[in-house]
Image: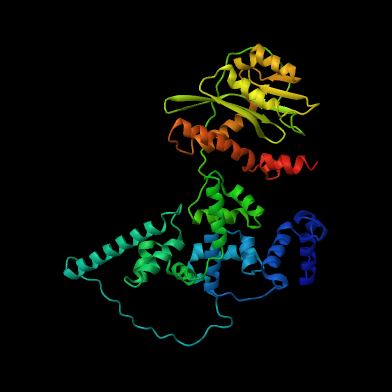
Amino acid sequence: MAKFTAEKKLEVVQKYLNNEGGYGFLSKIYETTPNTIKKWVLQYQYHGEVGLIKNYTNYTGQFKLDVLNYMNEQGTSLYETAAIFNIPAPSTILTWKQILETEGLDALKSKKMGRPSMKKETKKTTYKKSAPTEGTIEALQAQIKRLEMENAYFKKVECFSSNARKITNKIKAQVIFELKDKYEVVDLVKVADIPRSTYYYWEKRLNQPDKYKEVKETIKEIYHEHKGRYGYRRITKELEKRGVHHDRKTINSLMNQIGLKCLVRLKKYRSYKGNVGKIAPNALNRDFSAEKMNKKWVTDVTEFQLFGEKRYLSPVLDLCNGEIIAYSVTKRPVYNLVGDMLDQAIKRLQPGDQVILHSDQGWHYQMKQYQKTLKQHQITQSMSRKGNCLDNAVMENFFGLLKSELLYLQEFDSIEHFEWELAEYIHYYNHKRIKAKLKDLSPVEYRTQVLEAA
């Protein structure tokens, strides 16, 4: 592989940053590997042009340990860690890690250059304080003090980690720092089960300002705004909309630090099913794409049972942007459940619209009144095949989200409270909940920004 000067590296990096090619494309032109170009880009982003100049630093053992601890706690990759600390070869960090795991901390320390000294080392005599004899008062007092220390440590750990998903080395170091005036650090690290070097690494950083403080506050704001329904991927996209750009792994790590995780639990969907009939063919045929509104609609009915009562929901979803354009809720699965929903949806039609309305073979959709209304407004009826839920997968997916993000996530005071929250969720789903396939916009945002602009 050819050697590259700092000027040549800068040329490649600038081409990448100017969107003149990706890692793979540029690696073929300059006859190197995509990972090498990625490394140069990261070095330039963290250190500027200086990061592209190869250095020959003799790293200290403490520096090596700091790098390994940083990578372990922050969850950064070898390439990203190497860029942050301006280490030319990421494989160097991997070597340090292997040495630490196999040979221990002392093996990380840099060895002096040149011939070893010929001076004889004089042995220093050290005197260790002898342990008190078992059963004596001194031994009992030492045991009591040790138990007091353990009790104090675990109480503080519980306090510090109340909002965290796991007890990290940083939390352990915080606890030791709080207790070191009362107990010896050498004893506390044994209780915490961490090396002393790890404690001192974090001690130096405890009083430093948190560079992610504002990001964490924004993450909390987004998380609670969406009632715990967003995981780190969607939160990352929401942050980007607010001008905050960080890698998804970083956001995931920050959420773990502050004890936030997506509360949605996936549940198997069970919809209300009617009798089987043969009224209309499957005109949709699992083609769930639509280039404009009012081209393809899907509908279905689902049942909720709370406080000894039942509620039935019948929505219509437009396949163009996934928006719920109409819905109705009733106490019993009577025809008006579907009829009222259909009347609402028809109001969305524009002159010249030719819509396919797809459903399962429920009895509502087999009624003459329903079919007559469709014909009056030139709506083509489409039905799923018997026992084939995949024919209406988009509608079932919406019901799955609705139950995961509302029914199984929240607690309700009454059936009326549930109905109010149901209406709120549908508004939230239409106006605020982003989708990757809609260019990270909500259904309404996509309709107003993309479709109307086209």
Can residue 207 be seen here? yes
In the image, what residue occupies the spot 79% across and 27% down?
A: 351
Q: How is the image coloured?
A: rainbow
Q: Identify the residue at the far bottom of this view.
A: 119
Looking at this view, is 207 or 25 the one in front? Answer: 207
Q: Quadrant for residue 43, please give it.
A: bottom right
Q: Which quadrant holds the N terminus?
A: bottom right
Place of residue 186 in the rendered image (x, y in percent of width and height, measured from the top left): 36, 70
Front-lying residue, 243 or 175? 243
- Would you say residue 388 is visible in this rendering? no
Which residue is at 64% across, 50% downward?
A: 237
Whether residue 272 sits left or right of residue 173 in the image: it is: right
Residue at the spot 55% in from the left edge and 72% down from the top edge: 63
Image coordinates of residue 390 in percent, x first then y, are: 64, 26
Q: In this orientation, which residue lies closer to the viewer: 320 or 13?
A: 320
Q: Residue furthest left?
A: 136
Looking at the picture, how far across and down is residue 61, in whole percent? 53, 73
Q: Quadrant of residue 26?
A: bottom right
Q: Is residue 118 above or below residue 230?
A: below
Viewer-closest of 188 and 247: 247
Direction from residue 420 to residue 175 in the image, left or right: left
Q: Is residue 449 above or below residue 158?
A: above
Q: Is residue 57 above or below residue 447?
A: below
